[in-house]
Image (cartoon, rainbow, N blue to C red):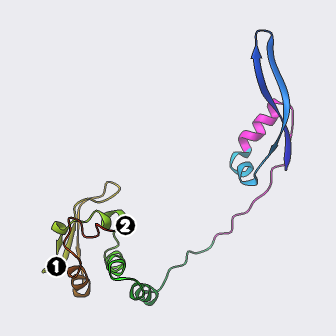
Amino acid sequence: MVFQIPAIISFSGKGVRIEEFELNVNVKFLLLYGGTYTIFLRVHRRTWEPTTYRVTRKLPFIPTEEDIDALIAGCGRKTADLLQLLKETGMRIGEVLRLRWTDVDLERGMIILNEPEKRGNPLVFKISQKLAKMLGALPMEKRVFGGIR
């Protein structure tokens, strides 16, 4: 769609010079700013027919536990450890990447989340022996997943 839209080209002591210019308008832009655009056209004594749009709502894809386990099994060691931790605890990725070894107790199978995102409260997670063994095989750096960027 191409619209002829008046534009203010210059200001001077004698007034304002207005010229027409063409504008290719994206349909998404029209849908988002249709009300503002309609008001703009009314001011300039123009009209338009807004495009109708209907949203088709679908349920999101939720993988089965077998799908997640297959994904974890197909990854490298460090990525598999990260994905297993995400699966078991439901932590956000930013929380996992900030996790320190002082927050992990492999003997008792617990992880303490002292730095939650989105102003959450500190939490304690119980982890499986499988995850504890996976995390125990990682190098003891300052952060559990310090090398991932």
| Looking at the image, residue 10 lies above or below residue 29 | above
Q: Mainly helix, strand or loop, the magenta region? A: loop
- Residue 128, given in percent of the width and then of the height, sits at 24, 84
| Residue shown at the point (35%, 72%) measured from the top left | 90
| Residue shown at the point (31%, 79%) measured from the top left | 81
| Residue shown at the point (55%, 74%) measured from the top left | 60
- Residue 9, given in percent of the width and then of the height, sits at 78, 25
| Looking at the image, residue 56 lies above or below residue 72 | above
Circle 1 SS class: loop
- Residue flagged by tag 2: what amino acid is it? Ile
| Looking at the image, residue 44 lies above or below residue 67 | above
Residue 42 sits in quarter: top right
Question: What span is in magenta?
Answer: 35-57
Circle 2 SS class: helix
**Residue 48 visible in the snapshot:** no
Residue to which mark 1 is pinned: 106
Foreground pick, 4 / 54? 4
Using a 10 Å C-alpha cutoff, classify the residue at mark 2 as few (fewer than 14 neighbours), some (14 to 19) or many (20 or more): some
Using a 10 Å C-alpha cutoff, classify the residue at mark 1 as few (fewer than 14 neighbours), some (14 to 19) or many (20 or more): some
**Residue 117 visible in the snapshot:** yes
Q: Is residue 68 left or right of residue 144?
A: right
Q: Is residue 38 left or right of residue 85?
A: right
Disc assigned to residue 93: 2
N-terminal of the two: label 2 or label 1? 2
Residue 111 sits in quarter: bottom left
- Residue 10, given in percent of the width and then of the height, sits at 76, 21
Q: CA distance from mark 2 to mark 1?
A: 20 Å
- Residue 98, given in percent of the width and then of the height, sits at 28, 62
